Image (cartoon, helix red, strand yellow):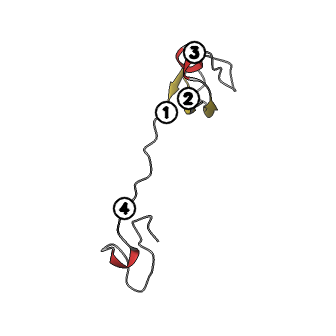
Amino acid sequence: MPNYDLKCVSCEAEFKQRASMTEKSEKLIPCPECGSFELETLFNAPPAYVKGVKAAECPNRSSGSSACARCPVA
């Protein structure tokens, strides 16, 4: 079952919920704050990764540091 990031339309509470696709599509998930079934799905961007670049080779790395200030590569 997938995890969803949801926001209640009624009370604007944001929460995470593990539910089946059927439960979500048929609006069977209640808001934990107010009980409303009117929810919207929040879409979060996945983290960006620099593939194949070592920190020592990264042009964004500050001098004297082994970690890049802008990349998640250590």
The residue carrying mark 2 is 7
User: What is the CA distance from the residue labelled 4 to the residue labelled 3?
Assistant: 38 Å
Whole-percent x, y for residue 20 in the image:
59, 24
Q: Is residue 13 left or right of residue 62?
A: right
User: What is the CA distance from the residue labelled 1 to the residue labelled 3?
Assistant: 15 Å
User: What is the CA distance from the residue labelled 2 to the residue labelled 3?
Assistant: 13 Å
The residue carrying mark 1 is 42
Q: Residues within 10 Å of mark 2 (few under 14, many from 20)?
A: some
Q: Residue at x 65, y 20 (%)?
A: 30
Between disc 2 and disc 1, whose residue precedes?
A: 2
In the image, 59 versus 36, the foreground residue is: 59
> SS for tag 1?
loop
Give the numbered dot on residue 27: 3
Q: Residue furthest top?
A: 26
User: Which mark lies nearer to you, 1 or 3?
Assistant: 3
Whole-percent x, y for residue 72 in the image:
44, 64
In what quadrant of the picture does the N terminus appear?
top right
Q: Residue at x 40, y 65 (%)?
A: 71
Give the numbered dot on residue 9: none
The residue carrying mark 4 is 50
User: What is the CA distance from the residue labelled 2 to the residue labelled 1?
Assistant: 7 Å
Q: Residue at x 63, y 20 (%)?
A: 29
User: What is the CA distance from the residue labelled 4 to the residue labelled 1?
Assistant: 25 Å
The amino acid type of the residue labelled 1 equals Leu
Q: Is residue 10 left or right of residue 43?
A: right
The amino acid type of the residue labelled 4 equals Val
Is mark 4 in CB contact (under 8 Å) with mark 3? no
Between disc 2 and disc 3, whose residue precedes?
A: 2
